[in-house]
Amino acid sequence: MSRKRKELPILENVTITDVAAEGNALARVNDMVVFVPYGSPGDIVDIKLTKKKKNYAEGRIARMVEPGSVRISPRCEHFTVCGGCRWQHLPYDYQLKCKQQQVEDCITRIAKVEAPEVSPIIGSESIWEYRNKMEYTFSNKKWLTFEQLNSSEEFTDRDAAGFHIPGAFDKVLDIECCHLQDDLGNRIRLFIKDYGKQNGLSFYDLRGQTGFLRTLMIRIASTGEVMVVMVFGEDDKNAIESLLSAVKEEFPEITSLMYVVNTKVNDTIGDQDVILFSGRDYIEEEMEGLKFRIGPKSFYQTNSRQAYRLYSVARDFAGLTGDEFVYDLYTGTGTIANFVARKASKVIGIEYVPEAIEDAKVNAKVNGLDNTEFYAGDMKDILTDRFIAEHGRPDVMIVDPPRAGMHEDVVNVILNAEPKRIVYVSCNPATQARDIAMLDAKYKLTAIQPVDMFPHTAHVENVVKMELR
């Protein structure tokens, strides 16, 4: 017989003092640090503890005693439930201040190297409707909030189209309106949801792995082009044809309408056939006259306008005059490589995903760039001393790794290659700072520029320039 878990207490009249990692807030009670989501500095709250360790605890706000002066009213009706946009209750200038501090702390506490002053963060021009890509899940068991569960209302309709509840793969919150993408995205999602209900189409059962309507991806480029990819859990050709025909008729502005039949356990479509229903099989983004084709499986920065500003910083840090040989590591679909190619003599891009490399080659061809080469494979296996000896020693290396940062083998190859400059673009200042410390053996940190790509979240991009000592 299992031991009954001890009920954790409620801490009363606690003052929130600061923001913390992952969008949480922080309070101190005696010698214990307490992490709380959706808190704001200055709030006085009662905290219901959900986890307690020796030196820290986690909890949730059980009662707002008195809101702090920093707090503002969040715009979204789903705030605190859907798990996204955890900083909606903080003014945007305060969000930027926190992100700036996050970068400064990582450089000081993790990198621990001689460093210049961090440049003021570049804020997002748009703080709403800035995402070019959204993904939604259909479910036949809608997540019910605490308020709904405690009400006397009976919920017979449990069909949902929305976001997964954090930490619960089988729980989906039904979304009425998301403010992160152009409202066209909301209208497309709600139309498909309503069509499904009116025509008796089954919503996916995430535990039973059955159902027709499964997931939906909507891309809306800064050019105005629109891609919709509908994923079905069953191969019912008549139902697929009818639904997509209705979507096409209702939304003639859709540039690319595609679908996938996915009957496997997970939702990823990277290994699935994507079938074109109408339009063309890509949409296009644009930067400085360069066109970038984006397919259903392509990676592209989700904030198009800020991506341009981010890549402009990277190009400026690279200090290109037209004569430089550049390596672009973790090149993805070659966006940075092609963006800088017109100011370089040659660019080599390396990326793990073969499909992304094919996109990169297409983008180079579309833009008439003949000074780029792209190679697919694991970075630590492709980028070796032998590869550099064969293809040439770079003048500049631009690196844009995933959140985990660079493998130590890759760092060592970069150190052996000794490019004059390294431009490091990162979505995780902590792992970037760790890698900076390793590169410090031969490179001096000379410039630091944070860029905010994701308003209302704790995420921040950071670009640094390092120069050979």
Image (tube, grey):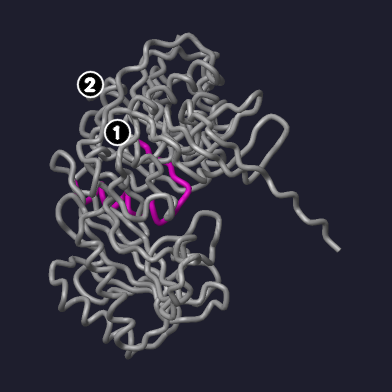
Where disc 1 sits, the SS reads: loop
User: Main structural element of the magenta stretch: helix, strand or loop?
Assistant: helix
Magenta-highlighted residues:
347-367
**Nearer to us in this view, 84 or 260:** 84
Whether residue 261 is visible here, answered yes or no, is no
Looking at the image, is 241 positioned above or below residue 65?
A: below
Q: Is residue 425 magenta?
A: no
Residue at (60% x, 37% y) in the render: 11
Give, as a three-letter code, the residue at label 1.
Pro
Where disc 2 sits, the SS reads: loop
Looking at the image, is 338 positioned above or below residue 169?
A: above
Residue corresponding to mark 2: 321
Q: Is residue 378 left or right of residue 445?
A: right
Q: Is residue 366 magenta?
A: yes
Q: Quadrant of residue 434?
A: top right
Q: Residue furthest right?
A: 1
Residue at (45% x, 41% y) in the render: 64
Q: Quadrant of the C terminus?
A: top left
Give, as a three-letter code, the residue at label 2.
Thr
Looking at the image, is 177 positioned above or below residue 131?
A: below
Question: x, y (%) of residue 230?
Answer: 34, 72
Circle nearer the viewer, 1 or 2: 1
Q: Quadrant of the N terminus?
A: bottom right
CB-based contact (under 8 Å), mark 1 and mark 2: no
Could you tell me how far apart the alpha carbons at marks 1 and 2 are, in whole angstroms? 40 Å
Residue corresponding to mark 1: 91
**Nearer to us in this view, 352 or 112:** 112
Question: x, y (%) of residue 466?
Answer: 41, 17
Q: Is residue 388 left or right of residue 186?
A: right
